[in-house]
Structures are given as structure tokens and as C-alpha cells.
């Protein structure tokens, strides 16, 4: 009955949910894998402990967490389908959990790469002046993209005090310092902003049409700036925020201060930058420690 049930299950997925042939083939392969490891037992007779043992075998074979999660998803869908039709008394996948995927580390520029990006000699037009102010502020203060584009001239900046006030996630407001190079770039931009800004536009950063910049426009300008600087890699706005966090942490070791400046509700979110810091230190160790090199 198992093979018949699998074929009916896949046929229903194709008809009712319109899944692609590629997805259906993956489901078929995942269920065939389950059947092959069941020592001839019908799939309808498998219990929770059987499925857990099979899942452990997937781990043992070296499959990535993503692949294991996808396989378990196919198993769950099949057994839910059987349960809805009364073919099994209880769903054996009910307590089956996919392995946790390792959290991807955010990509950050090295300090020298950041210097190459921000010290890039751009055209002396008003939009290049604006771009330099944006990117300096990104890196100086660790802003999110949404925070940067939402800044207003009158309410957000205090260049005398060297501070910027932003409204982050969940409407939480925070004030963060602005470095001297960012202050200089912002002053240059404010001197020239009236050349393009509409008279009634409160936004700090505006487009050539005089209205508030969109997040997508900032992304495109930064990618273009990175190409022209000869950096040799794609740079997105959040990478400047990551670079700010990892560089401040490398210099100060003050995780709590970095948390506050980034506007993270939990320090657990900020702790991912300790891994970036460790990677940096590990490279230094490998390059400098006399016993780090294998004979």
C-alpha cells in the first residue's frame, strides 16, 4: 500500500497545489529514502521512534541541516496527508524536529576595505556629496537602512553635539554618536542640499527629484560606489552596519555599548559580532604566532 499511497499523495500535490515537477521529484526521493531505510515495513506502520532513528541516520550521513530539514518536511507532509484520510491513527512526525541551522555570520568589511570604500574620490557633484554623507553616516553610527532614509533634517541631526537620533524597530528611539568624518561629510551635504531638495521636503537625504530617497535607491548607489572604488565585491547597506559593529567591538570589547548603539532589544542578537571578532583574532594568531603554523 505504501507505494500506492505515495503516488496518490504526489498526484494530489500536483493537482491541488500545483507543485513543480522538480519539487514533486524531491518529495518522491525523500519518501523513497524513508522507505529504503524501513527494512521492508510499510510507511503507514512506522512509529515516531522509527522516524527519529531515520532522521538520526540522515545526520550520520553528513547531510546539511538544510537538506535534513527539507527531507523531514516531505515526511511531515506525507504523514499529515495520511492522518487526514484516516489511514493512520496518529501522526508519527508530530514530535519530529528539524536540526537547527547554523546562524549565518553577517558579512563585514575589513577596516582597510572600509577605508578604501569611504576614501574613494568621487565626482564633485551634489549627488556624490550626498552619497558620501550617507555612507559615512552608515558606517559612523551603525544605522539600519530604514533608519537612514527616514532621517529628517530638523529633528534628527545635532552636528554640534555629534549625535543623530533615529527611530528603530518597534518605534524605539535611540541617539548614537556621529564621527568627525561623517560630520564633515554631512556639513558638506547640508550646504548643497538646497540645490536638489524640494522646499517642503523634510528628508535629510533626497533624490535628484528633490524627494526622500527610497531604500532601493540607496542600495543601488552604494553598489555603484563600491564598484567605482575598485573594492572588487558587492557591498550592501547592512554590510556597513555590520562593519561598524565588528570594528567597534574589536577596538573596545564593549558588547553592551555596541548593543545600545545598534538598537538591539536583546544582547543575544549583538553576540553574533563576537564571532566576527574571534575570526579576526584567529587570523591574527595564525599569521603572527610562532607556533600557529604546522610543520
Image (cartoon, rainbow, N blue to C red):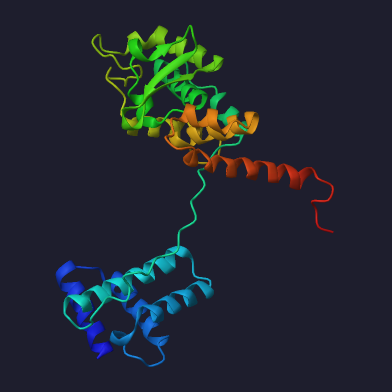
Q: x, y (%) of residue 154?
A: 34, 10
In-image side of 174 versus 290 (left or right): left
At 23% from the left and 85% from the top, the residue drawn is 5
Q: x, y (%) of residue 11?
A: 19, 78
At 69% from the left and 46% from the top, the residue drawn is 282
In-image side of 160 versus 109 (left or right): left
Q: Is residue 233 above or below residue 50?
A: above
In-image side of 171 versus 283 (left or right): left
* Residue 111 in sight from this viewpoint: yes
At 26% from the left and 83% from the top, the residue drawn is 6
Q: Nearer the viewer, residue 265 or 235?
A: 265
Which image quarter: residue 131? top left
The quadrant in which the N terminus is found is: bottom left
How many labels, in total? 0
Q: Nearer the viewer, residue 118 or 259?
A: 259
Q: x, y (%) of residue 166?
A: 38, 22
* Residue 229 in sight from this viewpoint: no
Q: x, y (%) of residue 95?
A: 35, 69
Amino acid at each position: 500500500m505504501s507505494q500506492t499511497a505515495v503516488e496518490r499523495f504526489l498526484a494530489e500535490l500536483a493537482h491541488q497545489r500545483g507543485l513543480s515537477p522538480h519539487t514533486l521529484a524531491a518529495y518522491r526521493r525523500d519518501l523513497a529514502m524513508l522507505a529504503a531505510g524501513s527494512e521492508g515495513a510499510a510507511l503507514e506502520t512506522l512509529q515516531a521512534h522509527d522516524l527519529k532513528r531515520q532522521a538520526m541516520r540522515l545526520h550520520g550521513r553528513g547531510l546539511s541541516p538544510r537538506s535534513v530539514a527539507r527531507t523531514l518536511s516531505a515526511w511531515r507532509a506525507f504523514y499529515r496527508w495520511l492522518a487526514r484520510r484516516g489511514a493512520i491513527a496518529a501522526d508519527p512526525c508530530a514530535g519530529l524536529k528539524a536540526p537547527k541551522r547554523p546562524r549565518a555570520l553577517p558579512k563585514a568589511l575589513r577596516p582597510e576595505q572600509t577605508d578604501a570604500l569611504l576614501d574613494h574620490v568621487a565626482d564633485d557633484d551634489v549627488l556624490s556629496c550626498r552619497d558620501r554623507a550617507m555612507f559615512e553616516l552608515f558606517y559612523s553610527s551603525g544605522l539600519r537602512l530604514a533608519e537612514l532614509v527616514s532621517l529628517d533634517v530638523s529633528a534628527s541631526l545635532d552636528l554640534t553635539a555629534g549625535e543623530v537620533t533615529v527611530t528603530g524597530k518597534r518605534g524605539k528611539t535611540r541617539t548614537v554618536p556621529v564621527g568627525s568624518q561623517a560630520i564633515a561629510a554631512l556639513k558638506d551635504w547640508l550646504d548643497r542640499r538646497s540645490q536638489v531638495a524640494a522646499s517642503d521636503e523634510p528628508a535629510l537625504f533626497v533624490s535628484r527629484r528633490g524627494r526622500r530617497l527610497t531604500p532601493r535607491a540607496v542600495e543601488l548607489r552604494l553598489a555603484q560606489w563600491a564598484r567605482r572604488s575598485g573594492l572588487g565585491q558587492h557591498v550592501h547597506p547592512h554590510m556597513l552596519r555590520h562593519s561598524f559593529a565588528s570594528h567597534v567591538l574589536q577596538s573596545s570589547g564593549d558588547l553592551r555599548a555596541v548593543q545600545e548603539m545598534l538598537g538591539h532589544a536583546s544582547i543575544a542578537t549583538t553576540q553574533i559580532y563576537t564571532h566576527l571578532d574571534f575570526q579576526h583574532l584567529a587570523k591574527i594568531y595564525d599569521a603572527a604566532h610562532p607556533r600557529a603554523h604546522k610543520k
